[in-house]
Image (spheres, rainbow, N blue to C red):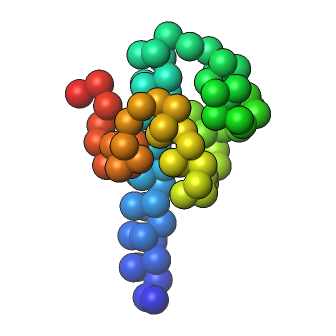
């Protein structure tokens, strides 16, 4: 892969991470639940939920499915849609 293309891919990955994090936070808050309660629903640690909501980690597909189910949304919505818009 050429260097310019690598930068484009990395930029796109970062945009997706940020969108994912904002969507997770939006849907969790719309359910009016704390990070701890949400973490318990997902079987994850509260600090991991915080990292997800702040785009500090790259969740696996399995984690994304668990999170999406807990939020009652399709995993695709977490990645491709801008929640709250």
- In the picture, measured across the screen, residue 16 lies left or right of residue 53, that is left
- The residue under the point 29% across, 25% down is 84
x, y percent for residue 83: 32, 31
Residue 55 visible in the current orientation: no
Q: Nearer the viewer, residue 11 or 68?
A: 68
Outermost residue to the left: 85
Location of residue 45 (image quadrant): top right
- The residue under the point 60% across, 49% down is 63
Residue 4 visible in the current orientation: yes
Q: Nearer the viewer, residue 13 or 65?
A: 65
Seen in the picture, residue 34 relative to 74 is either above or below; the reply is above
Query: Which quadrant: the C terminus?
Result: top left
- In the picture, measured across the screen, residue 72 lies left or right of residue 48, that is left
- The residue under the point 46% across, 77% down is 6
Q: Nearer the viewer, residue 8 or 31?
A: 31
x, y percent for residue 69: 48, 38
Location of residue 54 (image quadrant): top right
Outermost residue to the bottom: 1
x, y percent for residue 65: 51, 48
Location of residue 19 (image quadrant): top left
Query: Which quadrant: the N terminus?
Result: bottom left
Labels in figure, total: 0
Seen in the picture, residue 42 relative to 12 is either above or below; the reply is above
- In the picture, measured across the screen, residue 60 lies left or right of residue 69, that is right
x, y percent for residue 58: 60, 54
């Amino acid at each position: 892969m050429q260097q310019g293309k690598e930068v484009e891919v990395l930029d796109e990955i970062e945009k997706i991470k940020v969108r994912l994090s904002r969507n997770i936070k939006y849907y969790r808050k719309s359910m009016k639940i704390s990070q701890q309660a949400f973490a318990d629903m997902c079987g994850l640690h509260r600090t991991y939920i915080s990292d997800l909501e702040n785009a500090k980690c790259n969740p696996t597909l399995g984690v994304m499915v668990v999170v999406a189910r807990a939020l009652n949304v399709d995993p695709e919505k977490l990645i491709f849609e801008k929640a709250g818009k």
